[in-house]
Image (cartoon, rainbow, N blue to C red):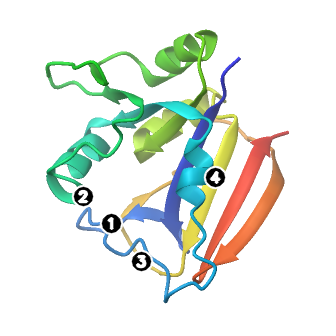
Amino acid sequence: MRSAKLYIAMSVDGYIEDSKGDVGWLEGHGKDEENIDTYSEFTENIDTILMGWKTYNQVVTELSPDKWIYDDFTTYVISHHRHESSEKIHFTNINPAGLIRKLKEEEGKDIWICGGASIVQQLMDEDLIDCYYITIIPTLLGSGIRLFKGGNREIKLRLLNTRSYNGMTELIYVRR
């Protein structure tokens, strides 16, 4: 069975966006001599991405307006907006939990939960995230969109690995 993996960064105080919806603060505090590429390591075992409309829109309008950066993956965008799907990008208004359950039963590599906070919370409420890759960015934002807003259940995790580079700390947890 495929695994659903959250791979996301947050500020030290738990935000994934600042109060203006900006993510320009997602960086370390200098040049890392080790040049660790955690993204490539993570995506080796991924072939599917799940994201919300806001995350999708931010990618195509701000972060990479000229090229779809996730072209190596099949992407599902949860949206109430009607859009034309393509071979690689599928727009759907299906409940994220139902979609993850369906995708886990299909053949393939693992599934990347890319964002945003509402989708993450819905999947946590159903205990459908198998692995949490969380990178802590050395920034205190004070306000914005929190990654974890409080759920309807306790989820016990087991720490698999930590790694620090460029002032950032990557934490990898699996459910206990």
- Tag 3: residue type? Gly
Residue depth check, mark 4 versus mark 2: number of the one nearer the observer: 2
Q: Nearer the viewer, residue 86 or 17?
A: 86
Q: CA distance from mark 3 to mark 4?
A: 22 Å
Location of mark 1 (residue)? 23
Q: Quadrant of the C terminus?
A: top right
Location of mark 4 (residue)? 133
Location of mark 2 (residue)? 63
- Tag 2: residue type? Leu
Q: Quadrant of the N terminus?
A: top right
Residue 37 x, y percent position in the rendering = 57, 63
Give the quadrant of residue 12: bottom right
Q: CA distance from mark 3 to mark 1?
A: 14 Å
Q: Nearer the viewer, residue 11 or 75?
A: 75
Residue 21 x, y percent position in the rendering = 26, 62
Residue 26 x, y percent position in the rendering = 41, 71
Secondary element type, mark 1? loop
Tag 1–tag 2 contact (CB < 8 Å): yes
Secondary element type, mark 4? strand
Location of mark 3 (residue)? 142
Q: Which tag, 1 or 4, sits closer to the chain's start?
A: 1
Residue depth check, mark 3 versus mark 4: number of the one nearer the observer: 4
The residue drawn where x is 60% and y is 48% is 42
Residue depth check, mark 3 versus mark 1: number of the one nearer the observer: 1
Residue depth check, mark 3 versus mark 2: number of the one nearer the observer: 2
